[in-house]
Structures are given as structure tokens and as C-alpha cells.
Amino acid sequence: MSAPALRIALLQLAGAGYDREQSLARGLAACREAAARGAHLALFPELWSTGYAFPGGDLEQWRAQAIAAGDPWVRAFADVAAELGMAVAVTYLESTATGPRNTVALFGSDGAEALSYAKVHTCSFDLPEHALVPGEAYPVARLETGAGPVDVGALICFDREFPEAARVLSLGGAELILVPNACELEANRLGQVRARAFENMAAVAVVNYAAPPARRGAAEENGHSTVVDPIAFDADGRSRDTRVFEAGEAEGVYVVALDLAALRDWREREVWGDRCRRPETYGALVERGEGAGA
């Protein structure tokens, strides 16, 4: 029997800024809407607990928004995952002993934490992210869902611009890469998402903030949340569009069906991903060079 489609809810919402009461209420409501529409997994945009906001450039005020992994705000999303029988990937500014981290916590349909990932490629060239403590690993977890088990990893926003990060997840067995986002998803970044999927034979689900109504067409947080799969050719060998779904700019809970059986068949029979790698020739990739951008 083939695997049923995995239904992923992209929670393309407007941020609530530092109002955690509002972000909690709106986030839980979005999860319930996603479950009512048959989703197996709900994904929030980057730093949902703060709306990826930095009002007034006040770094100390921003640091004060960090919350612990066991905070009631975080636990509420674990509880709603168990209540709904639906996995939830929620994002927040995490308080740690060494400083704030940009974190996504993935709770399974039983409410247990399946995965916690902290953004590795922090935007250290800009406020406020230069104050973040970067993550140091790319975990992959087997997530039990209503569509069966799925091997899942995560990247956060800027992480997706580094092919090495997605490749590490691929080597860890990830079939699906979740990407909370908070920046403009224009043609080039959307092209990156397709490339990460194609080269690693993994599906990628990206969720962005909706564009504020007064700024539709502006250059940041412009929606266009997307799901892509890696299946580049159809059964007749013809090139196909790997974009499973792409939203517009408006707010919405977008439930997207991902064909796991087709994805796994592609992974079994095609040559990308790990099959033809020659890692013994790639030493320069892990050396700090002196060239542009080093």
C-alpha cells in the first residue's frame, strides 16, 4: 500500500510583534484551522514569538523577549499538537545560558518534542541577529504523522542559502526539510529552494510572513510560502515543475499535499543526493578560505 499524502499547513500569517498573548492566541487558532482542514503538520514563520520584530532598534528590549524552551508559551503549542493529533513546528526567540537563539521546536502529534533546531547561519552582519548564539548541528528526526513516519530536518531562513546545510540534513536521511522564513521570497530565493530540493532529493517546505496590506509588493516578508519536491522529470522523462504550491502575499493557512510515495520512489531510483558523491574531493568546502565572502 502506498503512503498517503502528507498534508503540510503553511501558516502564512502577519506577525504580532512583542505581544506574546496575541501571538499565542492567533497561533493556536491557526493550528486548529489547519487540523480542521486535515493537516498532519503545521509550520510557523521564523521567530513567531516576536513576529521577527525589532522596534526602535532597542537591542535590550529585544533580548528581553527571549523565553525558555519550557516556557508556558512554548508548551502551549506542544499541548495543542497533542490535542489535535497534529505535529506543530513553532518558532521562538529562545533564552539560553549563553544568549538568545533563533529556534524551531517540532512537536509530534503526541505533544512530545521530536526536534529542536537553532539557526546556524545567523545574520551576524545585521541587527539584531548579531546578538544571537548560533546553533551547531543539523538534527534529523523521525516524525510520526497521520500519513505515517517521515524523516524531517529544519533550516531557518538564511540557512537555506548554504547548500552544505541542506546536504548535511540529506546525509542524515531527511526526506522533508522545514524552513521557517522572514524575508522577501523573490525569484532567486525561490530558485534556491528548488535547488536545495533537487540536489538532495528531499522536499522543502518554506513558510514566510504575509505581506502587510499597505506594503503588498514591498521587499520584505512578502508571503510566497512554498512547497517543492525534488521530482524533476515525469514518467515519460519530461521536465516538470517541482513547485507543488506557492502562495500569494496575503495571510492564510495553506494546506498542501505532498506525495510521499512518489517522493520515496524518486529517492530510490534517481542519481542525485548521496549516490554519486565523492566527498574525498571536497576538502576545500570545510576550510576557511581567503576569497570573496570568506
Image (tube, rainbow, N blue to C red):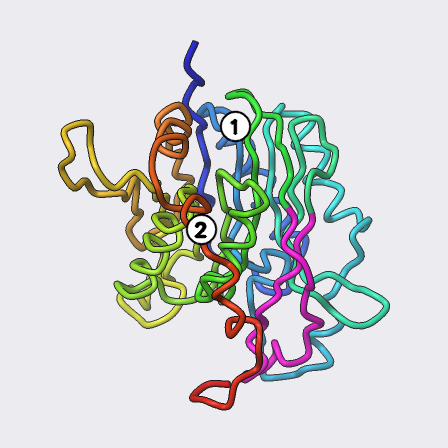
**Numbered range of the magenta stretch:** 116-139
- Which residue bears the numbered disc 1? 40
- Which residue bears the numbered disc 2? 207
Q: Residue at x 25, y 41 (%)?
A: 232
Q: Residue furthest top?
A: 1
Q: Is residue 115 left or right of residue 14?
A: right
Which image quarter: residue 237? top left
Q: Residue furthest front?
A: 280
Relative height, residue 111 to residue 11 (above, below): above
Q: Quadrant of the N terminus?
A: top left
Which image quarter: residue 28? top right
Number of numbered labels in the structure image: 2
Point out which mark residue 147 bears.
none
Which amino acid, mark 1?
Answer: His
Q: Residue at x 45, y 35 (%)?
A: 8
Q: Residue at x 79, y 47 (%)?
A: 72
Which amino acid, mark 2?
Answer: Val
Q: Nearer the viewer, residue 290 or 125?
A: 290
Q: Name the spot of residue 163 as percent of width and height, x first.
A: 45, 62
Secondary structure of residue under mark 1: loop
